[in-house]
Amino acid sequence: MKCREFVEFVMEYLDGTLGESERRVFEDHVGLCPPCVNYLNSYKATIAASKSLCDDPKEPAEVSVPEDLINAILAARAKS
Amino acid sequence: MAILIDDPRWPAHGRLWAHLVSDSDLDELHAFAEANGIPRRGFDRDHYDVPAEWYDRVVAAGAVPVSSRELIVRLRAAGLRRRKPETSIEELLPGYLEDGHFERPASPWRTEGLDPAERDELRELVMRSIHSLPEGHRNVLLLRDIENLDTEEAAELLGISPGAVKTRLHRARQALRELLEPHLREGTP
């Protein structure tokens, strides 16, 4: 496995949806490639940083979700 | 008919900046800027970038302090919002050498043990970086990683397939990671 393939598999690896043999190849590569260890950790940190935008009680996510999308979310939540 | 300014908390070029806009017309904005010594080169599509140290003076001259969200809402309502041309997601993905290794190997990041000021700065950086993603990818990331919708819900809302949601989410995260890396790698002040 090369770094390029490794990056393609990162999300599925973190979601736990990689097949057994792919997961073994992925983890073997992590053991051999420090830049991919850094990539995996920083990918996880990127997700955590996005999620943390919702965690600030004084200022909930101030990223501008388009208004039609907000309305669609509200409508979907009202239905459920 | 007002000149609006948001909080000076947008980092760029080693300083903090506020956005100055008009909620009625650009002529009013340019006239206000000129009268207050804000150079024309600070104008960017629909706003002037104003350095933090000028904030009090500009407010004293009549600019109305508002939140960033209100500033955007009123700019849109006035029909004066002009978005940056979108960058292609491809330009934001990692580059590889011919042998499949990273062109620029990823570095360890410093995201633990940040003090409150550094956490605020990181939050601003993440918000700005998410804003700079292409819209189709940004929307998926907002729904999945911030609104915490699952793949199927996001797919339904956006009118795309679950597979497309997964592909866009992974690319959006990769692009966001690339945008954050120069600021967060260890050894970065």
Image (tube, rainbow, N blue to C red):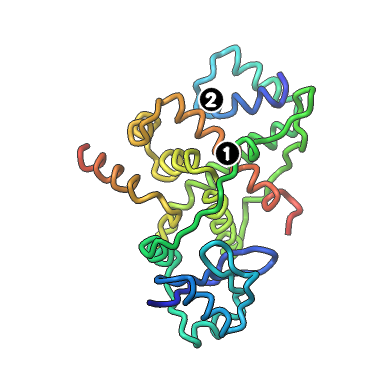
- Which residue lies most toward the front here? B27
Q: CA distance from mark 1 to mark 2?
A: 12 Å
Q: Which sits in the foreground, B6 or A22?
A: B6
Up-down relation of residue A59 to residue A68 (above or below): below
Numbered disc 1: secondary structure: helix
Q: Position of residue B45 (x, y in %)?
A: 55, 61
Residue B12 can be seen, yes or no = yes
Left or right placement of residue B171 versus residue A77 in this view: right
Numbered disc 2: secondary structure: helix
- Residue appearing at x 45%, y 54% in the figure: A63
- Let me know if marks 1 and 2 both belong to one chain: yes
Q: Which mark is residue A12?
A: 2
Write down the quadrant of residue B89 in the picture. Answer: top right
* Residue type (three-letter) at the residue carrying disc 2: Glu
- Residue appearing at x 54%, y 56% in the figure: B123
Q: Which sits in the foreground, B23 or A74?
A: B23
Q: Position of residue B136 (x, y in %)?
A: 47, 39
Up-down relation of residue B106 to residue B96 (above or below): below
- Which residue lies most toward the top here? A21
Q: Quadrant of the C terminus of chain A?
A: top left
- Residue appearing at x 50%, y 33% in the figure: B168
For disc 1, the marked residue is A44
Q: Chain of mark 1?
A: A
Q: Position of residue A8 (x, y in %)?
A: 61, 25
- Which residue lies most toward the bottom here? B60
Q: Chain of mark 2?
A: A
Q: Which mark is residue B118?
A: none
